[in-house]
Image: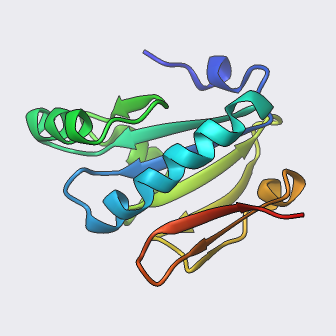
């Protein structure tokens, strides 16, 4: 079991992404989350991907083909998604070190406008190829 209090400790921001391997938009954003995580993990940033898949074998196969370096947790009975009142996938929730929810994004937005990203001088946008482009602003 992973406790949010342990994940948040010493972190500035936690991104919780509710997704499923069968969800097309979820698959689109996952490589960009991997890039963002690798660029920012040493700056107090962590991603928790909460998989809402019912078929564990299909989830495992997807992650074998497209591995990520951030934690992927399985919400077996969808209780966490229900607790957060998640209505669609993907849904991304940003939580600050103070435990406050900073932002909720449902779906894959054209422009990511995370307040914390501005502090890191990061901008992310959706390209015409449906990929999230993460850029460091000068």
Count of all numbered marks drawn on residues in the image: 0
> Residue 113, located in which quarter of the rendered image?
bottom right
Image height of 50 relative to 112, above or below: above
Write the residue at 30% across / 42% down: 78
Position of the N terminus, as image quadrant, is top left
Image height of 28 relative to 101, above or below: below
Write the residue at 59% across / 53% down: 93
Position of the C terminus, as image quadrant, is bottom right
Q: Nearer the viewer, residue 99 or 66?
A: 66
Image height of 43 relative to 51, above or below: above
Q: Residue furthest front?
A: 138
Its colouring scheme is rainbow
Left or right: residue 31 versus residue 67 is right
Q: Residue furthest bottom?
A: 128
> What x and y, as percent, mark residue 43?
79, 33
Left or right: residue 100 versus residue 131 is right
Image height of 52 relative to 99, above or below: below
> What x and y, as percent, mark residue 102?
75, 55
> What x and y, as percent, mark residue 100?
76, 45
């Amino acid at each position: 079991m992973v406790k949010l209090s342990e994940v948040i400790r010493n972190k500035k921001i936690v991104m919780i992404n509710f997704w499923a391997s069968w969800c097309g938009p979820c698959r689109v954003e996952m490589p960009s989350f991997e890039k963002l995580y690798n660029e920012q993990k040493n700056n107090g940033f962590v991603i928790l991907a909460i998989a809402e898949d019912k078929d564990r074998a299909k989830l495992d196969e997807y992650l074998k083909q497209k591995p990520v370096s951030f934690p992927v947790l399985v919400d077996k009975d969808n209780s966490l998604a229900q607790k957060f009142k998640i209505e669609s996938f993907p849904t991304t929730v940003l939580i600050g070190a103070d435990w406050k929810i900073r932002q909720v994004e449902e779906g894959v937005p054209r422009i990511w406008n995370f307040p914390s990203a501005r502090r890191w001088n990061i901008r992310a946008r959706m390209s015409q190829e449906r990929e999230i482009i993460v850029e460091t602003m000068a």
